[in-house]
Image (tube, grey):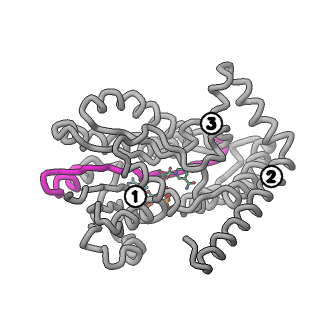
Amino acid sequence: MAPKTVLITGCSSGIGLALAVKLAQDKQRRFKVIATLRNVAKKEKLEAAAGPALDRTLEIKQLDVCDERSIRSCINSIPNRHIDILVNNAGVGLIGPIECQSIEEMKAVMETNFFGVVRMIKEVLPDMKKRRSGHIVVISSVMGLQGIMFNDIYTASKFAIEGFCESLVVQTLKFNVFISLIEPGPVVTEFEMKIYEDAEKADYSQTDSETAEIFTNIYLKNSKAIFSSLGQSPEDIAEHTLRVIGTAKPPFRHQTNTIYTPMTALKHADPTGALMTDSFYKLVFKYDTLLHVSLKAIRLLRWQAHKMRQGARLLGFR
Ligand SMILES: NC(=O)c1ccc[n+]([C@@H]2O[C@H](COP(=O)([O-])OP(=O)(O)OC[C@H]3O[C@@H](n4cnc5c(N)ncnc54)[C@H](OP(=O)(O)O)[C@@H]3O)[C@@H](O)[C@H]2O)c1
């Protein structure tokens, strides 16, 4: 079978880079990867990770999801504009009290995380419909299903894309075009670093001291603990995405971290929303000690599991 052409957005780092390399290095050579970056000057890390796959099964192209001309010129440069699988990965984060964020900053998040994906889908969907075949993957988030304090705008952008895809998928299935939302929990990438760096530089004088205190002393502390206890690697997400891509009838939703599944189910268990709001309120403001103890226990269990896997590998088990 001819390899499938996979176009991925945002491959300069993190999940996009890991996925591009994983697919390009596939032993069965099932994929031809078009790894796109908004700024090709940042291609070094990708080139190094791709190794011998570079310019064989992995080709680098410029594409900015916020710029329609750049999207069109990239897609037009692909023979017959033929893309079998589009992976919408490019994304940006924003955390903090909304009083400290400008509308411009908020719009920039929506431009990338929501309209960026919409622009990409508008460009590739007509060709996929004509061919009656295709797969559109969106790297969403568990925050596309459940809001998290101080992630108001980021969460809104992921909810928006989830709602968009949920509406679109029934129509696209009529044309044999699948849509899959990959919903990771925390992933240890530059994304996390960038939002913490921005949070450190931010000016909190626009909010009251109590809110600023909750953000810096509770939210940031919890968030860092959660990332170090529950965070997956970009390679883990690439592995999950490969599994979804490789399925004959890909699922519409795929969560990569099962620890988060009960959290995202709370709102469905109680339509008034009280179960969800009470649980989060208590977790953040009343039982934070319990939260930190549980996270430490999880970190220890993951470390032990990691050591056991290492030991098993050394002994020749897979
Ligand atoms: N990290 C997490 O905890 C986490 C959890 C759930 C979901 N996600 C989602 O996973 C996706 C990838 O994030 P990541 O964690 O891998 O973060 P990352 O390492 O910061 O990667 C984000 C990528 O998006 C690119 N990008 C940003 N704006 C773009 C634009 N206008 N056009 C094209 N590319 C653009 C960045 O390029 P530059 O290098 O040029 O900035 C970078 O390559 C995002 O959609 C994110 O929302 C992340």
**Label located before the other in sequence (2 or 1):** 1
- The residue that disc 3 covers is 264
Q: Secondary structure at mark 2?
A: helix
Distance between the alpha carbons at the discs numbered 2 and 1? 34 Å
Contact (Cβ within 8 Å) of mark 1 with mark 3: no
Magenta range: 72-99
Residue at the spot x=30%, y=32% of the render? 173
Distance from mark 3 CB to nearest ligand 1 atom below 8 Å: no
Vertical position of residue 229 compared to residue 268: above or below: below
Residue at left offset 46%, top offset 51%? 91
Say which residue label 1 marks: 10
Identity, as a three-letter code, of the amino acid under mark 3:
Thr
The residue beneath circle 2 is: 294
82 is within the stretch colored magenta: yes
Say if disc 1 is inside 8 Å of ligand 1: yes
Q: Residue furthest top?
A: 272
**Residue 295 locus on image (x, y percent):** 77, 54
Point out which mark residue 132 bears.
Answer: none
Task: Report which quarter residue 276 is drawn in.
Answer: top right
Residue occupying the point 20% across, 37% down: 132
Is residue 19 within the magenta segment? no
The kind of residue on which mark 1 rests is: Gly
Q: Which element is circle 1 on?
A: loop
Q: Quadrant of the C terminus?
A: bottom right
